[in-house]
Image (cartoon, rainbow, N blue to C red):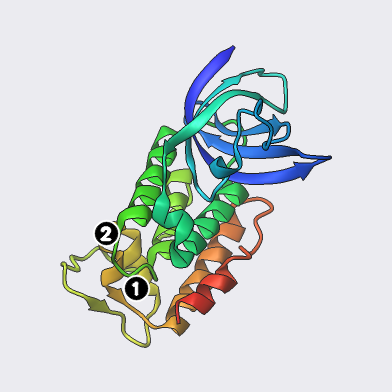
Amino acid sequence: MLVKSKAIFLKQIKYGEGSFIIKLFTQAHGLETYFANSIKSKQSALKPSYLMPLSILDIVYDMKITSNFQRLKECRTYTFMHQIHSETLKSSIAIFAQELLFKCLPEKEANDELFEEIEIFVYYLENTQNSLANLPLTFMLKISKIIGFAYHTAYAEENFGSAAITIPEENVSSALHFLENTSYDACHELKIDKQKRDLLMQKLNRWYEMHVPGYSQINSTFILSQIFQ
């Protein structure tokens, strides 16, 4: 059965001489695995330029329910993300998000809400000129909520308003409450230093470890910690 779907590139694994196993999160069927022959050949549906962090693709593939690997028939870039793929800071955040999604998305489970949330994140990351320091934390909170293990703080709901917010020294957990309930466009309003931000990342990684089987520390968190001094 031929299936047409939007897809988000998550991972490639080299297989043999010139072939690859590709992981794509598709809107139609969730996380799928594809086998691709040499992506440098003219006959290949995939091109190296498609396999960039969080690339949004438009694909056609031959869906075989009993097979672990699907075959791509057609593939093209749905939207080209120039800033994400050329700016070091944005590219680093995209790699972080890509690694997070690969670790926690179940195979073959479509989730329109989750796909839409990732798209919103990608487009925001591509176009924003705001500070990006709090964006990875906000993304983790939104993804966990959709998947089914929202991070619940012990703090009552309150209206933080639009003014810049500084979290008290003794209470870093209230920062998660703010980020959990704000938009990507507003998360930069939270003013926290590197030490608190690293602590919040540790808290969320432990939260994911509690709820995602086989989840392990995201390697790119170290890079983000160095970038956001």
Measuring 63% from the left and 39% from the top, which residue is drawn there?
Answer: 23
- Which x, y percent locates residue 9? 55, 42
Q: Say whether residue 127 is visible.
A: yes
Mark 1, residue position: 174
Above or below: residue 218 compared with residue 100: below
Q: Which mark is residue 185?
A: 2
* Label 1 element class: helix
* Label 2 element class: loop
Q: Residue furthest bottom?
A: 169
Q: Residue flagged by tag 1: what amino acid is it?
A: Ser
Above or below: residue 212 compared with residue 31: below
Q: Say whether residue 142 is visible.
A: no
Above or below: residue 4 compared with residue 83: above
Measuring 54% from the left and 41% from the top, which residue is drawn there?
Answer: 50
In the image: residue 124, left or right of residue 160: right
Q: Report the Cα–Cα distance between label 1 and label 2.
A: 19 Å
In the image: residue 199, left or right of residue 172: right
Tell whether label 2 touches label 1 (CB within 8 Å).
no
Q: Residue flagged by tag 2: what amino acid is it?
A: Asp
- Which x, y percent locates residue 18? 77, 39
